[in-house]
Image (spheres, rainbow, N blue to C red):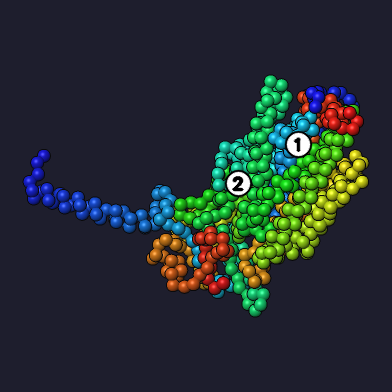
């Protein structure tokens, strides 16, 4: 293929500053919400002593998982040598960094003591998967930054492949770590499964690519760059495969649990009578986030850019629903302390935990997305992340239009 | 200095006797309750034995005593108020038989909260007491996710009426300390056990699980008892009878 020319976004237009202003406002509101939560204490949120991780964690974990998935496009180019994806690699790396930053900032701002971030960075309990994750997140920033440098600096272009390989292996480890935060919780019926680690990797493929596609379509459109059918179709089909794989993993995860008699109650809770969690699973995760996007992407509807964008938005919403079911639904189901007994206490023993998201939590969560998008928008202005054109003739010499 | 044979045998004999007896004497000394100046050792393992058959319906003396002792105050918000100890009522699904028991941190030998804590703020003392270091707890609540007993509470709002021996703070996680301040003063009891005894129920016995002469050890050796969630193999310091 021809040499790819990357250019910065001009970033002078009213539209650019308006967009940056919008994202900035979302971030400012989120920071104010975090300040409110920290000042008053967490009692002003929906979280309590039964549901200890709430909406901020839904957004944070979603963004962290999507971050590693967003890097896939670059990995396909560098590690698996697919030339078509090469012009997209820089933006893939950028989104990986910005999404992770957005997710981590939300996670940190929800801590009881966010002022002690330095403690988390200096005291490590190496038996804790959480401590390992802190190392994996920091390492991810460093490795992806290095990877981007190899891509940007022509003298170092030859090192793109080893750097891409390192980043690919690191991101697989990172998502394994994220899934294991839940997988290693032996006391809770909804977790305690080795399947969660590979499932999170598959989920990351779908969430990351959905966000990548949306940002790519918006950025090319906003900067008047051509985005050809070849690139869109390839990404669209890949997204469909990832969504199907995510559904497959959801089926296997629940079938595995259904085979284990001890887990029948929690499965019944999630799949049948868990109220909002059951709805979030079937309507959000399965239908909106899985079946509907698959129909759009693999039917004639998938020829429309607007429909592809809709499918991507649905995958993001389905992803948030999945995190809601996994994180909050998993906690809401009561701990099995006394089998064969009806348990009651002043501490919600034996009953489904109550939780309703509060406005500050939702605002903080959404601000994570705002941080990621603000970073991405600004970065596109200061460095040449986007190729001049993604027209079919430029990306694929064998395309019919060339 | 020169020694004759008689002196040599006398001094040598005394030295041998000293070397033989000293370790034993030293061990006996260590096995006694330590003074507050001494460091905590693994020679003790503190625990509780709870006889559910003696735990009275409607009695909350242990809960009240614990929360008074440690300055744990309610804000009349049950969902977010901390509870270091709670009364749990069990009703058998088949027979309808009702039991009561107090539930608190089980002071596991292999505590999941300690395993998952990213900073090491959750820790276990040498004598088996599981605690939170309030200086390095970042308030991530992962320990609460990991605890099989829901023994921990997050401090959701500003605290008032703190006790010097039980520092608490908004944004950190806390739980039963097994009245570590009493143990370190050599009082050998906990607020909950003391309150239960004063009520005349004697459902909670505190003691050293490693001291065969302690009441708790004797009871455990003579009668059946069980741990909660024994399948997790956490080897709890809190044992139950009559379940």
Q: Are marks 2 and 1 in contact (CB under 8 Å)?
A: no
Q: Residue placed at 71% from the left, 63% from the top?
A: A258
Q: Is residue A344 above or below residue B32?
A: below
Q: Position of residue A398 (x, y in %)?
A: 85, 31
Q: Residue placed at 46% from the left, 52% from the top?
A: B126
Quadrant containing the C terminus of chain A in the rendered view: top right
Q: Position of residue A230 (x, y in %)?
A: 86, 35
- Secondary structure under tag 2 reads helix
The residue pinned by badge 2 equals A129
> What chain does badge 2 belong to?
A
| Mark 2 neighbour class, 10 Å CA radius: few under 14, some 14 to 19, many 20 or more | many
Q: Is residue A269 above or below residue A327?
A: below
Q: Residue placed at 79% from the left, 23% from the top?
A: A3
> What chain does badge 1 belong to?
A
Mark yes or no: residue A267 visible. Answer: yes
- Secondary structure under tag 1 reads helix
Quadrant containing the N terminus of chain A in the rendered view: top right
Q: How many marks?
A: 2
Q: Is residue B47 above or below residue B160?
A: below
Front-lying residue, B183 or A265: A265
3D distance between C-alphas at marks 2 and 1: 27 Å
Front-lying residue, A326 or B108: A326
Q: Residue placed at 52% from the left, 55% from the top?
A: B110
| Mark 1 neighbour class, 10 Å CA radius: few under 14, some 14 to 19, many 20 or more | many
């Amino acid at each position: 293929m021809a040499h790819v020319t990357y250019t910065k976004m001009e970033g002078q237009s009213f539209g650019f500053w308006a967009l940056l202003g919008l994202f900035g406002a979302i971030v400012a509101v989120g920071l104010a919400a975090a300040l409110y939560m920290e000042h008053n204490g967490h009692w002003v949120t929906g979280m309590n002593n039964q549901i200890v991780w709430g909406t901020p964690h839904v957004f944070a974990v979603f963004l962290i998982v999507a971050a590693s998935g967003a890097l896939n496009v670059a990995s396909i180019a560098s590690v698996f040598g697919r030339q078509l994806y090469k012009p997209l690699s820089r933006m893939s790396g950028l989104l990986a960094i910005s999404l992770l930053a957005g997710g981590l900032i939300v996670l940190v701002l929800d801590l009881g003591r966010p002022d002690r971030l330095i403690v988390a960075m200096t005291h490590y309990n190496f038996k804790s998967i959480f401590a390992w994750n802190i190392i994996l997140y920091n390492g991810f920033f460093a490795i992806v930054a290095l990877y981007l440098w190899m891509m940007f600096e022509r003298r170092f272009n030859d090192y793109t492949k080893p750097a891409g390989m390192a980043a690919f292996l690191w991101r697989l480890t990172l998502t394994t770590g994220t899934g294991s935060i839940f997988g290693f919780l032996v006391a809770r019926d909804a977790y305690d499964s080795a399947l969660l680690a590979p499932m999170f990797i598959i989920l990351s493929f779908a969430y990351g690519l959905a966000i990548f596609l949306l940002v790519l379509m918006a950025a090319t459109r906003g900067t008047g760059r051509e985005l050809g059918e070849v690139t869109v179709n390839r990404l669209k089909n890949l997204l469909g495969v990832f969504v199907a794989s995510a559904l497959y993993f959801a089926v296997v995860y629940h079938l595995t649990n259904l085979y284990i008699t001890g887990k029948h109650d929690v499965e019944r809770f999630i799949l049948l009578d868990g109220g909002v969690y059951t709805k979030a699973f079937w309507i959000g995760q399965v239908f909106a986030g899985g079946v509907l996007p698959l129909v759009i992407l693999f039917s004639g509807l998938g020829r429309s850019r607007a429909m592809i964008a809709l499918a991507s938005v649905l995958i993001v919403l389905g992803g948030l629903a999945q995190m809601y079911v996994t994180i909050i639904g998993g906690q809401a189901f009561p701990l099995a302390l006394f089998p064969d007994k009806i348990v009651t206490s002043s501490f919600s023993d034996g009953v489904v935990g109550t939780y309703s998201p509060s406005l500050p939590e939702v605002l903080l969560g959404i601000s994570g997305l705002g941080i990621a998008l603000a970073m991405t928008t600004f970065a596109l202005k200061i460095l040449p992340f986007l190729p001049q054109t993604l027209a079919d003739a430029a990306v694929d010499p064998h395309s019919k239009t060339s | 200095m020169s020694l004759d044979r008689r002196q040599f045998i006398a001094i040598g004999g005394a030295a041998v006797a000293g070397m033989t007896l000293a370790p034993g004497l030293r061990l006996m000394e260590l096995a006694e309750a330590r003074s507050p100046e001494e460091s905590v050792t693994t020679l003790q393992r503190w625990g509780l034995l709870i006889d559910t058959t003696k735990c009275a319906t409607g009695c909350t003396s242990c809960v009240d005593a614990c929360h008074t002792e440690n300055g744990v105050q309610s804000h009349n918000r049950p969902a977010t108020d901390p509870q270091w100890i709670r009364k749990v009522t069990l009703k058998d699904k088949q027979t309808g038989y009702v039991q009561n028991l107090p539930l608190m941190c089980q002071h596991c030998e292999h505590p999941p909260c300690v395993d998952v804590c990213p900073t090491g703020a959750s820790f276990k003392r040498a004598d088996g007491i599981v605690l939170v270091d309030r200086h390095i707890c970042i308030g991530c609540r992962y320990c609460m996710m990991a605890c099989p007993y829901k023994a921990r509470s997050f401090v959701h709002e500003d605290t008032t009426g703190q006790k010097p021996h039980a520092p608490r703070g908004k944004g950190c996680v806390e739980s039963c300390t097994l009245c570590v301040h009493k143990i370190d003063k050599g009082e050998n009891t906990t607020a909950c056990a003391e309150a239960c005894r004063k009520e005349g129920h004697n459902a909670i016995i505190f003691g050293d699980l490693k001291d065969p002469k302690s009441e708790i050890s004797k009871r455990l050796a003579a009668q059946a008892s069980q741990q909660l969630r024994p399948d997790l193999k956490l080897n709890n310091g809190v044992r139950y009878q009559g379940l």
